[in-house]
Amino acid sequence: MQLLFCWKRFGRAGRPEREFRMPVKRTYMPGPVRKQAILEAAARVFAGKGYRSASVDDIVEAAEISKGTFYIYFESRKDAFVELVESFFDEFARILKENHERLEQTIDGGGDVIQALRENVMSVLGFHGDNPDLTVIAYREALGRDEEFSDRFEELNQFARRLQREEFKTMADRGLMRPEDIDLVTSITMGAAVEVIMEHILGKKRPDIEGLADSLLEYHARALAPKGMNIDKALGEVLKKPGKKSSPGEERRSA
C-alpha cells in the first residue's frame, strides 16, 4: 500500500522530518450507487436531526464523503431532501396502485377478498417498516414544512383516498361489506393505518408487521362484515394460517 509523506518542522535543528501517514481508504462506487448511499445517509440525518437542524456537513460526515463529492450529485441540502421525499411518494403511490389492482382482480375473479386485503395491508405497513427514515421525513418533516411539500403530501393523500373509496364502493355494491357512509369508512381506515404506522412501527427495532396487519384487518373486517357472512370462518382461513403464502411485503423483507 502506498504511503503518503507529510512534512513538518520541529526539533532544535529545525530540520524537516519525514512523517508517514496512511491514506484514507475509499471504496469505489459507480455514480448511481454512490448517489444512493448519500441519499440513505441524508435520510438518517434528516430523520434524526430534522431538516432545519441538519446541514450538508452532517450529511457528508454520515456518508463518509467530501463536500465536493456531495455537490457532484446535489446542488444543496434541499435538493437531497426533495429527492428523498419524491422517492417516498412515488414508491408509495406505486404500492397503492398495485394493491388496488390486486383487490379489483380478486373481486372480479371471485377470489379470497380477505386474503387480498391482508396482502394489501401487509404491503403498506411493510413499506413503512422497511423505510423508517423516509417515513419520518415524509410524515413529520415534509408535511407542513412549506407549501410545496404540503401540497405534494395532500396529492398523495387524495390519491390513496380515491383508490380506497373506490374499493369500498365496489365491495358494498357486491355485498362484500355492509352499507355504510363510504367517505366516513375511508377516513377511519386511513386514519387507523397512519396511527399504527406512527405509534407501532416507527421507533420499534423489530415491529411485528404481520401481527399488526392481522389485527388491523380483523378489526375493520368485523366492523364492516355484511349480515349473514361468517366472518370468523373468513378470517380464520387467512389470519395466522400455517404455511400461508407470503405477501409481497414479506417476500421483499426476506430477500
Image (cartoon, rainbow, N blue to C red):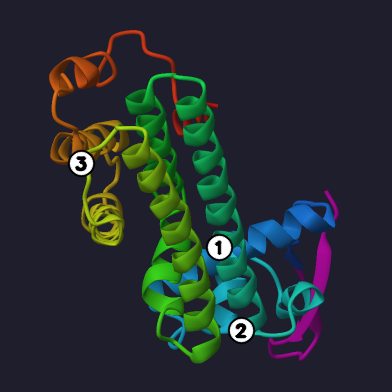
- Residue found at x 77% / y 72%: 73
What kind of residue is marked 2?
A: Lys
Mark earlier in primary sequence (3, 2): 2
Between 108 and 206, the residue placed more toward the observer is 108
- Residue found at x 26% / y 13%: 237
What kind of residue is marked 3?
A: His
Q: Are marks 3 and 1 in contact (CB under 8 Å)?
A: no
In the rendered image, which quarter is residue 199 located in? Answer: bottom left
Which residue corresponds to mark 1? 89
Q: Is residue 219 above or below residue 9?
A: above
In whole angstroms, how far apart are the C-alphas of marks 3 and 2?
Answer: 39 Å
Between 206 and 99, the residue placed more toward the observer is 99
Mark earlier in primary sequence (3, 1): 1
What kind of residue is marked 1?
A: Phe
Q: Are marks 2 and 1 in contact (CB under 8 Å)?
A: no
Which residue corresponds to mark 2? 78
- Percent position (x, y) of residue 156? 50, 66
Rendered image: mark on residue 170:
none
**Nearer the viewer's eye, disc 3 or disc 2?**
3
In whole angstroms, how far apart are the C-alphas of marks 3 and 1?
Answer: 25 Å
